[in-house]
Image: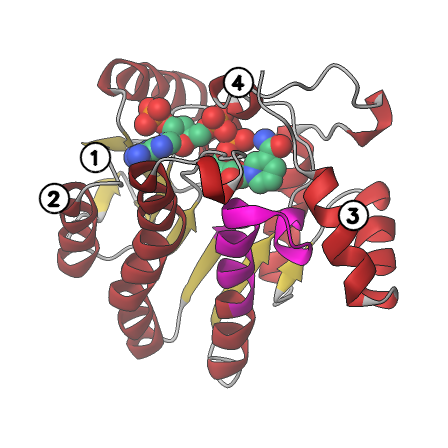
Amino acid sequence: MVHLNNGDEMKKWALVTGASSGIGESFTRLLAAEGFNLVLVARDEVRLNERAAGLKSKYGADSIVLVADLATESGCAKVEDFIANNEVEVLINNAGFGINKAFTMSDLAKEEEVLKVLVRTPMRLMHVALPKMKERNSGIVINVSSVAGFIAGGAYSASKAYLTVLSESLNTELSATKVKVSALCPGFTRTEFHQRGRMKMAGLPQFMWLNSDALVAKAWKDALAGKPVSIPGWQYKVLVGIISSVPRSLVRRVGMNLRVKQR
Ligand code: NAP
């Protein structure tokens, strides 16, 4: 077990994938402030070690760095093994990236990478974590999905729809227990996501941008309250309300145009 003994206090462990930047990094600071030790997962070892040092100096939290490329079988298996052999109280499935090329013009390898990082990995990590949480009758899983999952905007959208629907199903399946599963569905959030995906964002109105720390605080509150889906920000609550009340044919038509184009 990785329970560390910090004086009288036994801190529990939270595992965050994509902990090196953006929404994942916000989660690591929130969870450290909430009294958890952290397991930090991503590919960039240098950045993860910097994050670990920051969490120690600011919050006194211990961190374990797990360098893993979640698009690979070995990277996914490494994190799975860690969860299987340790007591992880909080799992944040957050690692991800955007793809916005038309399906008929995209690389098959890139399409498969989307499935491996956004779909296969969170599914497998939950498959190992949730039975243990159920047995302990304690644990929280937050899957970082997207409002894109509510529209029909290509492979990214489809992957996020999978994650939201699976989260909702698991929330119901575990409703008689104290294990909580929630999908966080952010709208446009200021992180490295759009720059990494070479997306054109100049035209997006200011009010549509969300702050990563604020949305993570809201997601945590919603998960603790047992909500299956968390949609931070009034603008995205309105948008999702509209999407669910207009005919799906309109959502399909507009959805493809809502996709962010590449630079
Ligand atoms: P970000 O700043 O680019 O962070 C992405 C994180 O995922 C990084 O820590 C990155 O770390 C990690 N990652 C990417 N590919 C990985 C891989 N193959 N293996 C392991 N780690 C990987 O973007 P973000 O906005 O915080 O994205 C986090 C999540 O939020 C994603 O699932 C995204 O789909 C979702 N989301 C974002 C927005 C938005 O507008 N920003 C909106 C809705 C949903 P390394 O590069 O070090 O591996």
Which residue is label 2 attached to? 74
Which residue is label 4 attached to? 198
Instruction: Give the foreground label among 1 and 3.
Output: 3
Q: Quadrant of residue 252?
A: bottom right
Residue 23 seen in this snapshot: no
Verify CB contact (< 8 Å) between mark 2 and mark 3: no
Residue 1 seen in this snapshot: yes
Q: Position of residue 120 (x, y in %)?
A: 31, 56
Which one is earlier in the sequence, the residue at label 2 or at label 3? 2
Q: Is mark 1 within 8 Å of ligand 1?
A: yes
- Per the rendered image, the range of residues in magenta is 143-165
Q: Amino acid at mark 3?
A: Val
Residue at 40% from the left image edge and 69% from the top image edge: 138
User: CA gap, disc 4 to disc 3?
Assistant: 22 Å
Q: Is mark 3 within 8 Å of ligand 1?
A: no
Which residue is label 1 attached to? 68
Task: Tell whether position 159 is magenta.
Answer: yes
Viewer-proximal residue among 204 and 20: 204
Q: Secondary structure at mark 4?
A: loop
Which one is earlier in the sequence, the residue at label 4 or at label 2? 2
Residue 254, numbered circle: 3
Q: Is mark 4 within 8 Å of ligand 1?
A: no
